[in-house]
Structures are given as structure tokens and as C-alpha cells.
Amino acid sequence: MLLQITNHSTCWSVKRCARNFLLLNLLGFLAACDYSQTQRSHYIEEGKRFYKSGDYQKAHKAFDKAAAVEPNNSQYRLQIAEVLSNLGDIQSAVKHYQEIIKQDEQALIARIKLGQIYLLAGKIPEAEKMAQEALALEADNSEANVLMGGVLSAQNNTDAAFVIAEKLLNKKPDDIPATLLLASLNAKAGKLDKAVSLLQHSLEKNPREVAPRLLLANLYRQTKQADKARELLSAIISLEPKQLNHRQRLAVFYLEAKQLGEAEEVLRTAVKDLPEDEQAKLLLVEFLATQRSPEVAIAELIPMVEQKPEDYELRFKLADLQFTQQNNTEVEEILIDTITLATQKPQAIKARNKLAQFYLANNRTEEAKKLLETTLDEQPDNKDALILKARLALADNNVAEAIAGLRHLLAEQPDNIKVLKLLSQAHVSNNDPLLALENLQKVLELTPSDEAARLELVDLLLKAGNTKLAEQQLNTLFKLNPESKNGLETLTKIYLAQKQWKQARQTAKALQSLYASDASGYYLEGLSYQKEGEFNKSIEPFVLALHKQPQAIEPLSQLIAAYLAVRQPEKALGKLNEIVKNQPKHFIAYNLIGSIYGDSNKFNEAIAAYQKAIEIKPSWSKSYRNLAVIKQLQKKPEEAIEVLKKGINNSDNTDLVNDLAQIYHDRREYGQVIALYEKIHQKTPESLPAINDLVSYVTAYAEDNSQLEQAANLLDPLLQSNNPYLLDTAAWFMYRQAQYEQAKQALLKAQTLGLASAISQYHLGMTFFKLSDKTQAKQYLQKAVDSKTDFNGLKEAKELLRSIVVK
């Protein structure tokens, strides 16, 4: 008995120990869960904060850390995907939804959400797959059925979609997603009254629901019931006053109704009601820039930045607007100030990248490179900096380096639109249009509504002579956006190129009707008359274009050209004098005045006009070039040289360098040309065009061995490029140095890259002759001579051809 009691006590003791152990483990598990949840929440909030500040890389890293807390917990990933979707980062959200589905065969919500994204993006087969998988998991799920209804509607299987919607509402009459589906199907079928009735009934049952109000407002807009649509959109703002997108929607409504004052008032009220919302201010500024003028937007934005200097997106917007107005000093000041203010914050890196981009746009490549080096030292994987680095390589004609860098980026981010577009441009520069087309087609697969990419594709097709395919792409564009301004402009230009004047004017008239406040339609109409030779008829459209947009450059230039073509220079001068009176800083107008006086041999008046243009815009190269021409016509070459030197210092323009080099060359001052090219190379030592100019000229005109030695040390970048013209330059230098085999290899490579000019055939012929291959020498020299092109060496080629005897 004692033994039994002892055994029982022992057993109870063991059970109690086991229970305590389990309890302790459970408490530990709960604590761990609590800690993991805290960690996850911390990372998600951190990700939101980084995302809002514009540091997308850190945001994504934070979200990845949140997912890594419990990588197999689909609920965590689902929450992250929702956050990313709400932040507008749809691509990252899609990746998380896809990962959830991969990990969890039962992930219903992820499939529905991913299907909805696919449906909105027009990826109907993918959306259908998600809908089918969701229904296989839960056949009665309302959202899954609504998704399938949307897919069927997109496939024009409207009857089947009706069956789904009605079946859902029979089970649950007040189901909002099903009501929205049925209402949209009725609207699509032309039963607008039925759709309106459904939505009104839904709002009676659910008066605080926003989605039915939005759809109903859209239906009222379609049926021209503007007052009812406006009331609904205003009511939505009252229901959710902190949601900026509702106010934006109402502003767009007013904008489409041409009620600019009301649209502006909505946006100004948003700024007032949501003082901490930076996006509200940006919307107002964007409205002012597009609907009023950039100057008005800048005037509005400057005090905003002064009041909240750490609202960095406002600073970036101000820099962008100043850039569009070519206020380069202001752009540079804003971005440098932002870098100083932000110090180590992500905005400092963004400002540095934008400043590098600004320097690149202004041919200040060395300064751009230094900024990028600083950024990449801090963040070697900064995507924006790496993209800019590739752009710099393209600017330097180092296409191979650009392509390699972009391909590396694309391997990490295969759906990066910016990289795909830039890689397409790089392939164009590399004379590889097929690869360029492939990349643009990938962009359009990802974003079918990307007008800019589609129009780039149209341009490539036109250059390749595929007019029919180009027109097909434009038709696709018009299906997506029947009133596409860019599409209509491109179509008009196609008609102009085909000399279809009547069709060109019809599309120009369509532009005038759709975009009455814009100059484009009137400008293109004038251009059609001008190209047809009807200069008198072109004048009125150009005048109207300028009336619509007084700052527009192209209509003004063509109007002046039309006046001059019909021999009315006094009217041209009258118009230009009127413009500079109203716009005293219109340097383009002063430049045109100078051109008119110059053509009339009124040199003093021309000089005064060009000097005024230079005073207003010292960084603009054209006035320097024109002024230098006048000085040469006056037989004042030294003054022309001084003008060009000043222009080079102020603008870094290569045309000015070439003009100055030409003057020195014509005066047989070859050493001065070499010194000029050396100076440019020292200023931009990695610029391939600068290296090419120096090596090419030294090859022809070097006066001492030190210059030849310097050029020899510069050959490698030219030889490593895939630019056939650069290869030809290097090859001809090696030929002059009796390095015939190396010259031949470089020239043959240039041939495989598409170089077939007369001068390149001459170079190959001469090289083969030096290598004692008379057959090949004769073949290439004959091609050069048969081209009927005049080139340096033509006489030598003819003489050598006569002397070559092939056995």
C-alpha cells in the first residue's frame, strides 16, 4: 500500500512536472510569438516610414525583414502585401502574393487579391487562373466569384458574368461586391437605369459605403448628370475627409468639365484641411503647373518649401519645375541645399542623384560622376545611381559598359520599367533595333497603358520602315485612350512624313477640338501647310498656336520662317519686337531678331540682338555661334574666336568647340586645334567623343612625337567600344604608326558593327595594301571610289587602284 501511494505520488509529481514544463514552454512560445509579432510590426512600420520618405530600397528591406521573422507565415506576408499595395507599390505586392501562393496551397485571399491586380492590369488569363484556383478552394466565396465575374466580363462573356452576380445576390441580397459587379454589367449592357437603381438601393442599405457611390458617380457622369455626380463625389469627401484621393477625384471631375476655378478650389481646400499631407500640396502645384503656368506653380511652391523645409518632395518638385523653365542656377541651389539639409537621410541620396542627373543633362559629366561615386560608395546597390551610371556611359558613347550595367540590373529586377527603357535606348545606340524592340515590347507587356513606351516603339518601327506595324501600335494606343494627345500628335507627324497633307490636317483639327487650350494642334496644322509649300496659309495657325501658348518656341520659329518665306521680314520683326516687349527675357526671340538682321546684312543690329540673347541666357550656345558667324562676315576672326571661347566656357557645347576648331583649321593653325581638343579632353577625360576628336586630329596633323605618344595612350577606350566610328579612328591612328595588323583587326570589327562608309573602305583598302594583300586592297579601294563620295584620300585611292595589279 505504501508502495502504491509512493508510486501514485511519484506519478502525480511527474505529471505536475510535465504540466509545468508544458506551461513554461507555452508561456515561452507565447512570449516568442509576442516578440516576433512586435518585431514584425516594427519592421512593417519602419517599411511604411521609409517608403513615405522615398527610400524605397530601405522600405523593401524592412518589409523583407518583416517577412523573414516567420518566412512561412502567410498571414504576415499577406499583411505586408496589403501595405505595399496601399502604398502603390503594386509590383512588390505581387511578388509577396506570389510567394504566399507558392508556400500555401490553401492561400485563398492571396489568390483573390493577385487576381484583382491582374484583372486591373489587363492580364486576363492570369486573373482567370487565380479566380479558378480560389473557387476550387472555396466555391461559395463571394469575392472569388466576383473576380470570376470580372474576368468573364473582360472576356466579353457577359451572360455568364450576369449569372454569377445574380446567384450571389440571391444568396445575400446586400452583398456589396456582387452589387457592384451586377451594376457594372448592366452599365456595360447599356441598361444604365437598372445599374443606377441597383446602386441607389445598395446605398439605402449601406449609407456609409464609398464604393457604390463611386460607381454611381461614374454612371451619372456617363449620362451627363453632372450635378448628381458632383453631389456624390462631395458626399464621399464628407464621409472620408482625410482620404486625399477623394478630393483628387472631385478636382479631376471639375477639370474635365473645364471648370478650372472649381478644381483649383478643391485642391486648395485639401491643402488647408490636410496641412500635414505633403501629397495634397504636390497635387495643387502640379495642377497649377499644367493648367496655369510653371511660373505660377513655382510662386506657390516657394513659400511652401520655406514654411516646411524638411518636406523634401516639395523641394524635389520645385527643382523639377525650375528645370523645366531652364532656371539652372536655381535647380543647382535647391538640390545642393537639400543635400546639406538632409545630411545622411535617404533624401540626401535622392537629391544627390537628381543633381547628378541635372549635371548630366547639362553636359557636366565629371561633376555627375563624382556625385555618383559618393552615392555608390555609401550604397553600392543604389538602383537610381546605377541607372544614372549607365546613362553616363551612354552619354560618353561607352555603349558596351551601359548595356552590361543595365543587364546586371535587369537580372536583379527583370520587371524594372526604367531599366528596360534605358536598355532599349542603349541597343538603339548600339545599332541593334531588334533588341531595342524586344525591351519595349516587354515594357508594354508589363504596363500596356504606357504611352511613352508605345510611342517609342512606334518611332523604332517607323525608322525600320515598318509603317504598318507602327500604325497597328497607334491603333492599340487609341483603343486604350481614344483621345491620346501624344498619339494624335504622332499620327499627324506620320501623315506629314508621308506627305498626306489632308489627313495630317484632319488629325491636327482633332487635336484642336480635344485640347483647345493647347498649341499643338494649331502648330501641326501650320506645319502641314508649310511642308506643302503653302506658307501664306501656315501663318494663321502659327499665330493661333502662339496665342494659346505665348512661351512656345516651335510655333514662333516657324511663324518667323513663314513670314520670311513670303518675303515679309517687317512682319517677322514686328512680331518679335512685340514678344520681347511683353516678355523681356525671351532670348529665343532676340536670337531670331539677330538672324533677320544678319540675313539683311545689318550686322550692328544683329550683334546687339545676339548679345542681348547671351546676356539673358549665357548658357545657351546658339547665340554665340550666330554672333561668331557675324564677326567672321565682318572679317573679324579674332573677335569670332573670343566669342566662341566665351561660349565654350559658359556652355560646354561641342558645336562651339567644333566651330572654333574649324576657324583654327582654316587658318592652318593645327597646333591650336590640338591644344583645344587637349583642353576639352582634360576637362572631360573619360568622354569618348573628346578622346575621338583629339586622336583623329592628332593622326592627321600632329607636329611632334609627344602629341603622338599622348594619342597612343588614349586608344584603349576607343578599341574597347562597340562604336564603329570610334574603332575606325583608333585603327587609322595605328595605321599611321605602321601597326597594320592591329589596324586591320579594328577596322574589320567596325565593319561587322555596320560601318560601311567610303572613308572606312578606303582605310581598309590602304591597310590591306600595306599587308601585301592586293586582292583585298583593290576590293575595298574600289568600293570607296565607287561610292561617289568625296573624302580625304580619294585622290590617293584612285592612284593606288590604277597601280595595283592582281595576279
Image (cartoon, helix red, strand yellow):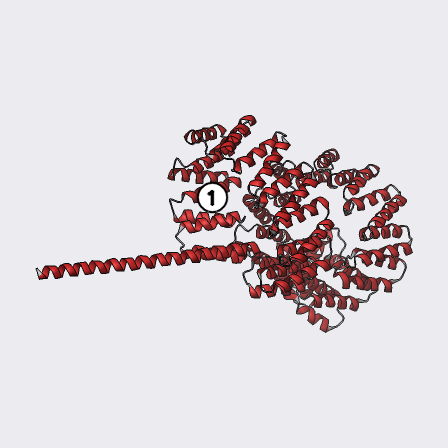
| Snapshot quadrant of residue 311 | bottom right
644 up-or-down from 501: above or below: below
Q: Please tell me whether mark 1 sits on a helix, a strand or a loop.
A: helix
Task: Quickly name the residue at label 1.
Answer: 114
Give the percent coordinates (x, y) of residue 611. Answer: 85, 58
Q: Residue 535, percent across and down?
A: 83, 39
Q: Is residue 432 visible?
A: no
Residue 729 lies left or right of residue 545; in this view the side is left
**Tally of numbered discs:** 1
**Above/below status of 782 relative to 115:** below
Residue closer to the observer: 389 or 757: 389
Could one spot residue 29 in this view of the protein? yes
Q: Amino acid at mark 1?
A: Leu
Q: Nearer the viewer, residue 315 or 795?
A: 315
- Say which of 168 and 381 sits in front: 168
> Measured from the top left, where is residue 772 in percent x and y?
65, 63
Image quarter of residue 558: top right
